[in-house]
Each structure stands twice: as C-alpha cells, then as structure tokens.
Image (spheres, rainbow, N blue to C red):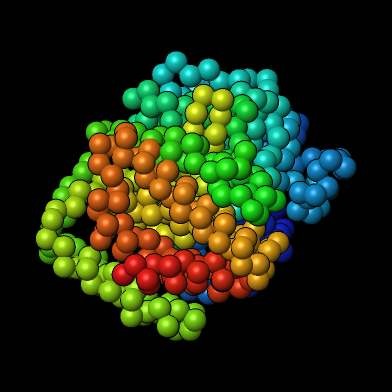
Amino acid sequence: MSPEAAVALLPGWLPHQRWFAGKNRPVDSVRVVAARRLEAGYPQLWHLLVEVAQGHDADVYQVPLSHRADWHDRLEHVLLGEWDGYYVYDALHDKEATAALLRHFDTHERVDGLVFHTEPGAVVPVGEQSLVLTGEQTNTSLAYGDAALLKVFRRLAPGTNPDVEIHDVLTRAGCEYVAPLLGWIDGGWVDGAGEQQTASLAMLQKFLITATDGWALAKASIRDLYAEADLHADEVGGDFAAESQRLGYATAEVHAYLADLLPTRTLGPSDLTPLAAQMHDRLAAAVQTVPELNRFAPSLHRAYERLGELTEPVMVQRIHGDLHLGQVLRTVVGWKLVDFEGEPEKPLTERVALDSALRDVAGMLRSFDYAAQDLLAADHPGNGQIAYRAGEWAARNRSAFCDGYAKAADRDPRDDEVLLRAYETDKVVYEAVYEARNRPGWLTIPLAGAERLATLS
C-alpha cells in the first residue's frame, strides 16, 4: 500500500486531532511532501510529512502511520480508515511500530533523509514498550516504560526546535534543572516553492519518574486552604510557599545557564520604546476583543509608558518563553523545567528571540494567580472570605517565588519593578484575549489580574 493512497483519509481525520491547529477551518487539500518507510516488516511503518492547505495558509504536519492487514481492537480509537485492504492507524499509538523508533536511535541510522542523533553517552532503552501520554495539546509524547520520553512535534516549522536546542545545550552543560536529552530526530521536505526545508521532528529525553506537575501541586495546596477557610495560607498544612521558593531558585539557575551558554545583548532606550509601543498596540487591539478590559486600560497603558521611559539598560537572553505551573515538574530531587518551545502560536523567529528573563518570571507570577482564581471561580463563587484567601495565597507564593529567584540570581526581580510590571500586564492582556476566544468562563481570571495590576500602575 502506498503512503500517498492513505493520505486520502487525512482530510476527515486531521480536524479531530487535539494537535491540529486548523480545527475551525475546512481542509482544502493534503499533499505528501516527504514519505519514508521506517519499518518494512509487520506492521508497516510509514513516516509522512504532509502539507495541509486551509485558505491562504499551508502548514506541514508530521503523521506517522502504521498499515495492518488485520483489525486491532486496541487501536480502534486511532483508526484513520480502511484503504486497499489495509487498516491505517496513527502509528504513535501502535506499540509494535514505535519500537522501531528506538532501534533507529540505537543504531544511529540515517533513513532516507531522517537523521537520528544521540547525546554523548546516552543510553537508549531499546525494547521498552511505548505508551502515549494524554493531555498534550500541540504534540504527542510517548513514555517508553519509565526510562525515556519521546516528544513528537506535530506541526513543523523549518529550523531547530527551541526545545531541542535548549535541552541539548543544558544537557551538555550538566544542568540539573531539566530532564537530560538523550537524542533527537531531524528531517526534511520540499515545500510548495520547491525549496528544501529541514526541521526538528522529535526529541528523546530521560523520563522523570515520581514527577508531578506544578499546577497539580499548587491546586492541592489551594484546596487545603479553602477547606480551612478560617486559616491563613501560612497556617495550612499544604502551604506551598517553600516549594514556590525552590521553584524560583531553579528558574534563576536555568536563566543563568542560558545566559552563559547562549547569546545575550543589552537593550537601551531606543530599543525599549518600540517594545513598549508593541505592548500598547496589543492592549488597544485586546480592548476591541474584550471590552471588559476598557475600564482598566488607562492604568494598564501607564505601565507601558513607564517602560518606554526607562533609561537603564536591560539585558536580554534566551528564555523559556511560556513559563507557568504546568511547565514545571517536581521530582524527588527537585524542580525541573520542561517544554522550552515557547508559545506555540508564535512563529519560530519570535520564539527564539532574545528577551528579558523577567518575561518568564511574570508568566509564573500570573500562574499563581490562575491557580488561586481557578478553584475560587469553580467551587466558591461569591464567597468573599475565600476570595480573600485566594488573593492571600497568590500573593504569598508570588513573593516566595521572587525570594527564591533573588537568592540564586543575586538580584530580586521586584527591584526591576517597571519592567516586571510591564511584562505582567502584557501577559494579562494576552490571557484575556485567549480566554475570550477559547474559554469564556475563565475570563474572570485575567480580568481580576488586570484589576490588581491597574491599582499598581
């Protein structure tokens, strides 16, 4: 069975996948831009890169497929359809098919343009069976036992994925605050203009056993607090402040590694003025989408005006780019930062651009607000006492995070109040637009943040 034939099944299947970016638009066409057979035995494993046209946009997606002559109940949920006597499945859910990927890493093979890289000294757990992890929005991750995690990038952009780039740099430097990189896959295709493109396709990391994400831990702390409504955050057994402080320390350490190992530069007043102007523009556009922001807009604009008036130089470097409690894992040996891709909707050039480390700090500070306000809105609407405790919890953990960051960085992020406030405000504006478009029921959370920041500006 040719892979081109199976592509006829994709227009009806792609819009139902969580990682497909064009769910709300019709698929005009799907074109194979690269096809490689990775496994000739049974099942057949085909690695496809397809260009999906939707209106004026065309995106390249990675779609590995397994072809089987027989029906498999355990793969029914990832069946694309039947074609020419074969059943076609999403190969990343097919344990027999995904076993081949580890073998290619182990042998360092080059398979018709696919290059399997491994880090020096990395041990590839050949023979481990894979299990697709649930919950990811933009990629597909497979756990190979408790030994390795393979993240497969679904929507591709030409160039090295920043998740691969940064993990490679930090792994070689011995940074203890990330999961070590074991290897990665590169591959290419020919685009619609006939140009050869190359991109990172997947990355293999050490699996972090005993890991729990920061969002889940923070929510557990908040539930404990809300269950004891007459106690303060520091009086409840599930107080999270010590963990927030450790997380701040880990974040500053990662920033220090990135500043030492990757390029940096300094922004002066002539650079900060256009940065502030971009933030002004985003707020002006956001008010059109979220009219509820309008009553806070004058005070929020003032935060950007103060940024444009700064005369002190600002150091910029590579950063995480999308740091929040869901992007950190607590293990028995401490906090680990994960997912250095940046905000997935931004173009790659923006995701790898140098920026102030305070953008990451601001993202985490907003995440503490989100954690507290999420449970408040869901379980205790209109409860003034719980609302007070929510604000107290968020303030306590924002402060603890900054304390930890200051201890590692020898500079308190709160000392750069103008810059930090501008980044927090910019994040709130982004959140408000996102929630209005995707989760209107959550809009109260960024609006509460806007109200708090407006009183400070």
- Image quarter where the C terminus lies is bottom left
Q: How many marks?
A: 0
From what the image shows, is residue 432 above or below residue 107? below
Residue at x-position 49% and y-position 36% = 242
From what the image shows, is residue 374 above or below residue 218? below
Q: Position of residue 129 (x, y in %)?
A: 71, 27
Q: Position of residue 322 (x, y in %)?
A: 44, 52
Horizontal relation, residue 308 to residue 146: left or right = left
Residue at x-position 34% and y-position 67% = 456
Q: Position of residue 445 (x, y in %)?
A: 54, 66
Horizontal relation, residue 130 to residue 387: left or right = right
From this viewpoint, is residue 409 visible? yes
Residue at x-position 16% and y-position 68% = 309
Horizontal relation, residue 277 to residue 351: left or right = left
Observer-nearest of 115 and 140: 140
Observer-nearest of 368 and 34: 368
From what the image shows, is residue 54 above or below residue 173? below
From this viewpoint, is residue 439 visible? no
From what the image shows, is residue 120 above or below residue 4? above
Q: Residue furthest front?
A: 230
Q: Quadrant of residue 211?
A: top right
Q: Quadrant of residue 199?
A: top left
- Image quarter where the N terminus lies is top right
Q: Position of residue 400 (x, y in %)?
A: 42, 43
